[in-house]
């Protein structure tokens, strides 16, 4: 929340209405046109403006209802059994924040979804369960809690849980609202299951080990060849990084999931990160463009977003809208806390729209509740 800029200044639209102008506006309207100065200040805000509001979705509140969906509808009926999380101000586009969609999907042992693909990109963050798997473009990959998985734009994918496993619940993240806003989405269903074209876990084993990549293979896709980022690698890496890194005052030990071939974002439209907030960490406040959906992977703490405090613990999901002041705090003095997040930064950055501001008494105000 910033002090309001006045529009009553040179360079901004400040035309006083008159009967003659009103008639003129009507004439334009009848021709499918309008006078820019009547809308200019609204469509060209002084600073980035988010339509979304900060929100927190408590897993304790939602879990029973997510599980209930697995009694009410079958995967065959629903396609995917998902409870989606929708921002109070983005219901019209089914977005959790900005142009990002998120949902919580449940799959019981022995169940699987239809194989399908869409122009929207998707990612998953595993919340609970055992022996869950995904098949992405013929690569079958086993999933464990806190693993991060990608299904990029137009890759065939299907998911399931092996017989003898435990009911799996994971968070889906997609850029559906963005791709729909660009009027470019599509969807296709595959008859039957995908043919497996690689040995089990090929992608994470071939591209996710020790910084090695296959030297005799060419990967020419515009997304990461590493489809799964294992918590069993990620968490130890964060602990090691904590020992040798300068702690980021806003984000603690702050790591981006990256395409191992380029060091860039994992997909063309969505990026993701994992951050470790050391015990007792009290983050400084800043704001930047880009929309963010967080899930607490470990620990407990709170975030203050545009002056409102949101307390989170493992599996809770919350969002930070573009240009919202935010700061993260670990409530424990002895345990670290970890926050997974996905975002639209690849788009924001490629379009030259990223900007960031550190909070100070002079450029904004925070109130706490
Ligand atoms: Fe999908
Ligand atoms: Fe931030």
Image (tube, rainbow, N blue to C red):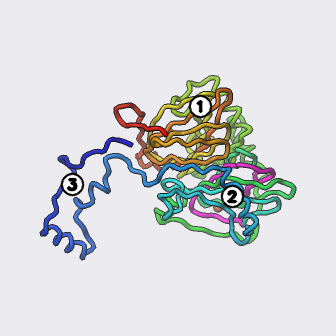
Q: Quadrant of residue 276?
A: top right
Residue that extends furthest to the right in the rendered view of this protein: 164
Residue designated by label 2: 105
Comes first in the chain, label 1 or label 3 = 3
Q: Nearer the viewer, residue 318 or 355?
A: 318
Q: Which type of secondary structure does the marked residue at label 3 adopt?
A: loop
Comes first in the chain, label 2 or label 1 = 2
- Which label number is shown at residue 13? 3
What's drawn in magenta, residue-wise?
114-142
Answer with left or right where residue 287 lies relative to residue 9.
right
Residue at the spot x=68%, y=27% of the render?
A: 334
- The relative height of residue 267 versus residue 240 in the rendered view (above or below) is below
Q: Nearer the viewer, residue 186 or 211?
A: 186
Main SS, magenta residues? strand
Q: Which type of secondary structure does the marked residue at label 2 adopt?
A: strand
Residue designated by label 1: 253
Is residue 23 found inside the magenta-colored segment of the image?
no
* Classed neighbour count for the residue bearing mark 3: other residues with Cα under 10 Å, few (<14), some (14–19), many (≥20): some
């Amino acid at each position: 929340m910033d002090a309001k800029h006045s529009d009553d200044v040179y360079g901004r639209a400040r035309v006083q209405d008159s009967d003659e102008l009103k008639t003129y506006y009507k004439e334009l309207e009848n021709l499918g046109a309008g006078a820019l100065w009547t809308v200019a200040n609204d469509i060209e805000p002084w600073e980035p403006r988010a339509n979304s509001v900060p929100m927190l979705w408590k897993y304790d509140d939602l879990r029973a209802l997510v599980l209930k969906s697995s009694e009410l509808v079958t995967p065959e009926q629903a396609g995917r059994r998902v409870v989606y999380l929708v921002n109070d101000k983005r219901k019209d586009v089914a977005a959790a924040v900005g142009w990002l969609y998120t949902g919580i999907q449940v799959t019981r042992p022995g169940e699987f979804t239809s194989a399908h693909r869409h122009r929207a990109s998707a990612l998953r963050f595993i919340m609970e369960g055992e022996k869950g798997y995904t098949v992405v473009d013929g690569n079958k990959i086993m999933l464990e809690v806190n693993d991060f998985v990608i299904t990029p734009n137009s890759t065939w994918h299907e998911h399931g849980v092996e017989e003898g496993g435990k009911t799996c619940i994971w968070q889906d993240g997609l850029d559906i609202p963005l791709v729909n806003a660009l009027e470019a989405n599509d969807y296709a269903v595959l008859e039957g299951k995908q043919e497996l074209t690689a040995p089990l876990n090929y992608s994470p084993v071939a591209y996710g080990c020790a910084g090695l990549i296959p030297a005799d293979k060419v990967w020419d896709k515009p997304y990461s060849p590493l489809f799964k980022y294992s918590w069993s690698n990620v968490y130890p890496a964060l602990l090691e990084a904590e020992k040798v890194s300068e702690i980021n005052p806003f984000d603690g030990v702050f790591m981006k999931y990256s395409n191992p071939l380029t060091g860039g974002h994992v997909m063309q439209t969505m990026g993701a990160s994992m951050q470790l907030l050391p015990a007792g960490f009290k983050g400084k406040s800043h704001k930047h463009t880009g929309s963010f959906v967080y899930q607490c992977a470990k620990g407990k703490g709170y975030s203050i977003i545009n002056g409102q405090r949101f307390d989170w613990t493992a599996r809770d999901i919350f969002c930070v809208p573009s240009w919202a002041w935010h700061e993260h705090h670990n409530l424990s003095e002895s345990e670290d806390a970890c926050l997974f997040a996905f975002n639209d930064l690849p788009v924001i950055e490629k379009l030259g729209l990223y900007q960031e501001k550190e909070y100070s008494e002079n450029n904004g105000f925070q109130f706490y509740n």
